[in-house]
Amino acid sequence: MNRLLILLLSSAFLTINSCSSESQDQVMNIPTEIKNNYAYSTDELETIKLINDYRISVGLNVLTVSDYISNKCEEHDIYMIAKNAPSHDGFTGRFENIVKVLGAIKVEENIAYNYKTPQAAVDAWLKSAEHKKAIEGDFNYMGLSIKKSELNGRNYYTNIFAKI
């Protein structure tokens, strides 16, 4: 009986959370004192949808979008633009911050550089074993930021996944 109840509740949860990426239901509710609203661009919303659509297609849960994590992604994009190079520099700090502030038990990061469209970036991640592993990981939240460098016109993507 307990298994049936868990299965029904899980099914209801997945149904509720399988709305479009623009749904407010998918934005993580975190305490007001640490909530940083993030204004998602059309490309960011498309990338989030592509990732969640892929996860659904392989039988995985939809990831809830966290504004807090997206702000961490944006900070890293700004860093990479200033450095004029893609990197995972400072990931340990982002990891530790998300663990401390949000109580995450697992955090992974994908970055991309110089892809002109969200589809191209997601396709590249899925062709890479390590990036695909992160996209398919045991997570329930994600954040995403895409920023364009004014210096070279190239897009910098940071996507962080968390199990909270």
Image (cartoon, grey):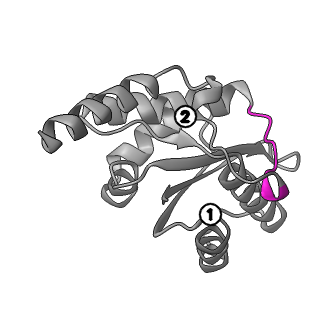
Amino acid type at mark 1: Leu
- Mark 2: give few (<14), some (14-19) or many (20+) Cα within 10 Å: many
Magenta stretch contains residue 146: no
Regarding mark 2 in the picture, which secondary structure is present there? helix
Q: Which residue is mark 2?
A: 48
**Residue 114 appears in which quarter of the rendering?**
top right
Amino acid type at mark 2: Ile
Taken as a whole, is the magenta stretch helix, strand or loop? loop
Residue depicted at x 54% and y 48%: 142
User: At which x and y percent is residue 89?
Assistant: 65, 75
Disc assigned to residue 102: 1
Highlighted magenta segment, given as a residue range: 33-40
Quadrant of the image for the N terminus?
top left
User: At which x and y percent is residue 159?
Assistant: 57, 51
User: At which x and y percent is residue 96?
Assistant: 61, 77
- Whether residue 63 is visible: yes
